[in-house]
Image: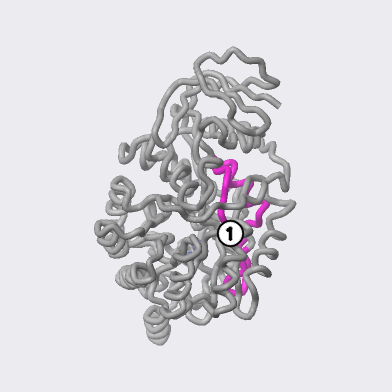
Amino acid sequence: MKTLIRNGHVVTATDNYHADVLIVDGTIQMLGEKLLVAADQEIDATGLLVLPGGIDVHTHFDMPFGGTTSSDDFLTGTRAAAYGGTTTIVDFAIQSRGHTMQEAFETWLGKAEGKATIDYSFHMIVSEATTDRLEEMQRMIDQGITSFKMFTAYPGVFMVDDGGIFRALQRAGEIGALIAMHAENGSVIDVLVEQALARGQTEPKYHALTRPPEMEGEATHRAIVLAALAKAPLYIVHLSASQALDAVMTARDQGQAVYAETCPQYLFLSYDNYEEPEFNGAKYVMSPPLRPREHQDRLWQGLKTNDLQVVSTDHCPFCMKDQKVLGRDNFAKIPNGAPGVETRMSLIYDGAVAQHRLSLNRFVEVTATAPAKMFGMFPKKGTIAVGSDADIVLFDPSGATQWGVETAHMRVDYNPYEGRETAGTIRMVLSRGDVIVDGKQFLGRDGRGQFIKRDTFHGF
Ligand code: URP
Ligand code: ZN
Ligand code: ZN
């Protein structure tokens, strides 16, 4: 099957040029001006940007949490991702205590197979750093799971003590794995939560007030020191606070292999959202929580200076009606997480390119190229180049998109960006050469997404 995208404006992390793109059997075969080739299908991209498909390396589809399960599964979640211009996701398989990583991997493969409409992989959540589990990391790498998430938060569930984290970092350093760290001081947060509840402070805003930015800064710094001692690279997930960014910047300035992602919610929303009336603050209960507005400029600056390399979503939706309401009388029982897999590319294009904070190339880099490089998928994914998968977004920079729960495709009963307009419109999305989104129409087949066997971490 040959598809020719005619007369578009190709943008990668480094280049910006007019070209036709020839796709043969799902792979980009030729790039050039006015290609003299016949194709089975021609797509006119005049006036459109031809972008690499977005890569969201932090989603939670069909994830059990706090007695419920995130409301998007691998079908609805990947479909929404595709509508939003994302063609690859990396989700999280959970190794729960007393169980093996292999069991977790097979469980999560079972959740995705037959459903995922775009390509996918998993990080492995490590909830116990026993000798057996650390041995098993190599078996995961052999199967293409090359990154492992650990927590300094959620004591009793996911949190591993510093010794366990240190052991896992040492092992990761030896075998070419990357540890992705959820860095908040869970033990101190638990004390603050207990004290707030004892004072009768039960509303959603206390979720944020009991998880102060200093406790993210402290845990980020601690993880960085442990990684340095273990001689391992480290990736900080969902970085939200300037204190955490300071720790990352200091380490990077000293030459340490420390990397970090932030998420659109920390760039566009703020603590003020928790003050919305009634129980509406619950929409934004996530960990780390939204921060006061002044953190936003620091995060944008971090993206500009490459102290933050990636924008992912931490998409973890729970419906207000049956799920967030579990914490109506106790903020600590509100399931943590919010939707965002569909809005990421448009929000970041708007905040970065349309509002002149970052270049178009840098937009591509933080949303596609850097995630692919960081997690062993480049150059198959994350760029437009000969030999790469034809994961492509045709983006109209002259359009505008209105966001709201009625028009979005995520399976959740609210949208944190309700009523917001972003510059530009996603016209078409291709995954391995298949047109899966054409305007408002979804053309992708359930289960067409393929598991991506990822490479080990080689530096970045
Ligand atoms: O609130 C969040 N972030 N929920 C998802 C789990 C996690 O820690 O990423
Ligand atoms: Zn996390
Ligand atoms: Zn997460």
Q: Is residue 436 left or right of residue 19?
A: right
Residue at screen point 67% across, 38% down = 442
Residue at screen point 66% across, 68% down = 102
Q: Secondary structure at mark 1?
A: loop
Graded by Cα atoms within 10 Å as few (under 14), some (14 to 19) or many (20 or more), the crowding at tag 1 reads many
Question: In the picture, residue 139 is in which quadrant?
Answer: bottom right
- Work out which quarter of the rendered image holds the N terminus and state it: top right
Give amino acid for label 1. Answer: Ile
Which of the two residues, 61 or 29, is positioned nearer the viewer here?
29
The scheme the figure's colours follow is one colour
Image height of 427 relative to 295, above or below: above
Question: In the picture, residue 152 is in which quadrant?
Answer: bottom left
Residue at screen point 34% across, 71% down = 229
Which of the two residues, 156 or 198, is positioned nearer the viewer here?
156
Magenta extent: 63-91
Q: Position of residue 155 (x, y in %)?
A: 48, 80
Q: Position of residue 448 (x, y in %)?
A: 71, 44
Q: Is 205 colored magenta in this rendering?
A: no
Residue at screen point 71% across, 51% down = 115
User: Can residue 407 be seen in this snapshot?
Assistant: no
Which of the two residues, 168 or 291, is positioned nearer the viewer here?
168
Image height of 308 relative to 65, above or below: above
Q: Is residue 150 left or right of residue 99?
A: left
Residue designated by label 1: 145
